[in-house]
Image (cartoon, helix red, strand yellow):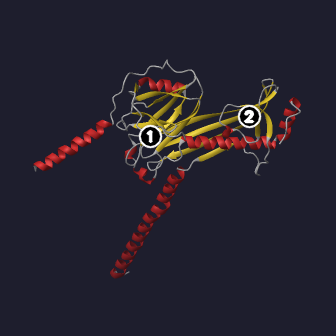
Amino acid sequence: MSEQEARGQRKLQVAVWGGIDRMCVHKLYVYGLAPLLLGCLTACETQVTLTPTVGTQAPPTCVIAAPLSYDGQPAYLPQAISAQPAADHATVLRYSYDAQYNAKQQATALQPLNPLLIVGFPTGSNAITVSGLLEVLRDGKPVRAYASACALKRTSTVFSEGETLTAMRRRALLLVRDNISAQVCHDQQGLRALLAADQPSIADK
Amino acid sequence: MSSRRLLCAALATGAVTVMMSGCATLGAAYTPDANAPRDKGTVYVYRPKAFAGGGISYTVSANGAEVSSLPSGGYFVYYATPGETEFSAKTEAKTSVTVDVKPGQTYYVQGSIGMGVFVGHPHLTQVTNDVGAKEIASCKLVPAAAPKAVAKTGS
């Protein structure tokens, strides 16, 4: 191989490797930073977990009129239950719910040192767990229960705090309400039988 | 030259004034409230002392009506009517937490400050009574300040 040919081959190698380097840097941006950015952006969405899962189809709609003991907001009561006064009934329904908050913030003093904040790296998270319980009480003792729990979690960034805990609580309470409604409607025959045993005149709508 | 010095002095004075305005004078150390009405719930809203964001103070509202400012290391007591009470605060971001108040019960709402673009983001969350009673012990009462605005309608 002549000296001229060797020089040409060297130039070709440099050109090829230079191109590959440029491609690698380009790929690093595309395959490295883009998913990171997407991950940070999707982390802002509120994650919802609801249990139990009530079938895959839309639940049947029903309304069961029954004596009820409940002191919360009417909006959070399962719509499958139509409240009647609880007096003079051995069998009553009792609905209750509870909300637990869990907020975590990363150390604020160290955050300015994190360059990823500018692409939406999470600065903290808020979580709430809401549980609802509908009990059928006969002479004060539970004979049947329908329970549901919903957990919502979202992360915050320097640009957005996302949903407030108030909004998350309301959303979770409504999801729990609908879930218990669906459970009641799936089991409406059994529930009606329980209620009818106590008060035959209970009207089913 | 002297006018430049004058400008620098004016800017420095302004900056110090702005920074010092975030430092509220706090009152007495925490003592459990013994005068709570029986038909209302007692809500302690407190903010543990922290260096980061310590110069930022924000106003806390209850059901839309401004109640008190909440500086770092401060607390105040709010007697809430039974039912849902929404506590909120806002700087460049809004935070709010709803407490389901029952008469005669005690609740703790913890405030903090997080990172923001231009100013820190306020955070309010309800904590358990064990955590709240422990953390509020090192806080001092925010002197009763007149609400800045007329009460708005509840959310």
Expressed as whole percent of the image width and height from the top left, the position of residue B49 reads: 39, 31
Where B95 falls versus B34 (above or below)?
below
x then y, percent, for residue A21: 41, 66
SS class, disc 2? strand
Q: Is residue A36 above or below residue A64?
A: below
What is the crowding at mark 2: few (fewer than 14 residues within 10 Å), some, or many (at least 20)?
many
Q: Residue furthest front?
A: B150
Q: Residue at x 41, y 71 (%)?
A: A19
Q: Which mark is residue A134?
A: 2
Q: Observer-nearest residue: A70 or B154?
A: B154
Look at label 2 and name its amino acid.
Leu
Foreground pick, A136 / B142: B142
Residue B133, disc: none
Q: Is residue B51 left or right of residue A201?
A: left
Tag 1 residue: B122
- Is the residue A84 above or below the residue B137 in the image? below
Q: Position of residue B94 (x, y in %)?
A: 47, 44
A84 vs A12, left or right, is: right
**Callout 1: 10 Å neighbours few (<14), some, many (20+)?**
many
Q: Given the image, on which type of amino acid does mark 1 rest? A: Pro
Q: In this rendering, would A32 be left or right of B119? A: right
Give the residue drawn at x 55%, y 50%.
A45
